[in-house]
Amino acid sequence: MSRKPGVRTVVYLGVLTALEIVLSRFLSISAWNMKIGFSFVPVAAAAMLFGPLAGGIVGALGDLLGAVLFPIGPYFPGFTLTAFLTGAVFGLFLHRRRTALATLGAVAVNQLLLSLLLNTLWISLLYGSPFLPLLTTRLVQCAILAPVQFAVLLLMNKALEKYGKRLLT
């Protein structure tokens, strides 16, 4: 998204944001300290198709609008920051090169640094829970989501190689 986005791009990003909200708020398994689902898919799609800024915007807007429209708990801006960074990381790793190694890098950074460390910090601050015990319980979420994200992103890579150009024209 290096130049001014056109109407078609804005519409795609709007649809992907709406899809992120639905997947996150209605089709995820959630507990106070964990969330397992596929809300990363529209964020990753935006990042792959339009770049890191678009991925970050879809992630952040999805989190912010989802929290306002369908609150699960108190709003905390740290999660919105993490959502933005998640989309940006997908874009940095996967916008121009969609290899298995780039996919692995994106999943590793998102799951280990952003989800496991940063989101655990936000949960710890928000709920006053000790960081290290919380971190160990959240390892389960990362252990489940990391291979799922990797496999889904590889499938998305193949689909975008085949249909991506048609989608954008």
Image: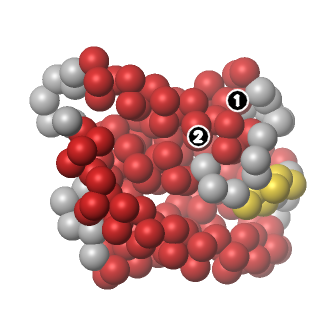
User: Whole-percent x and y of residue 102?
Assistant: 31, 74
Disc 2 secondary structure class: helix
Amino acid type of the residue that numbered disc 1 sits on in the rendered structure: Ala
Residue under the point 61% across and 50% down: 39
Q: Is residue 51 visible?
A: no
Q: Camera-side residue: 139 or 150?
A: 150
Per the image, the residue denoted by label 2 is 20
| Quadrant in which residue 38 is drawn | bottom right
What is the image's colouring? Answer: secondary structure
Q: Quadrant of the N terminus?
A: top left
- In the image, is residue 51 above or below residue 14? below
- In the image, is residue 120 above or below residue 143? above
User: Whole-percent x and y of residue 131?
Assistant: 75, 66
* Total numbered circles: 2
| Quadrant in which residue 144 is drawn | bottom right
Per the image, the residue denoted by label 1 is 67
Amino acid type of the residue that numbered disc 2 sits on in the rendered structure: Glu
Residue ranking furthest to the left: 3
Q: Is residue 53 visible?
A: yes
Labels 2 and 1 touching (C-beta < 8 A): no
User: Whole-percent x and y of residue 156?
Assistant: 42, 62
- In the image, is residue 4 above or below residue 85? above
Observer-side mark, 2 or 1, equals 2
Q: Quadrant of the C terminus?
A: top left
Residue under the point 49% across and 74% down: 150
Residue under the point 73% across and 60% down: 36
Q: Camera-side residue: 129 or 87?
A: 87
Disc 1 secondary structure class: helix
- Label 2: how many Cα within 10 Å (few below 14, some 14–19, many 20+): many
Residue under the point 13% across and 29% down: 3
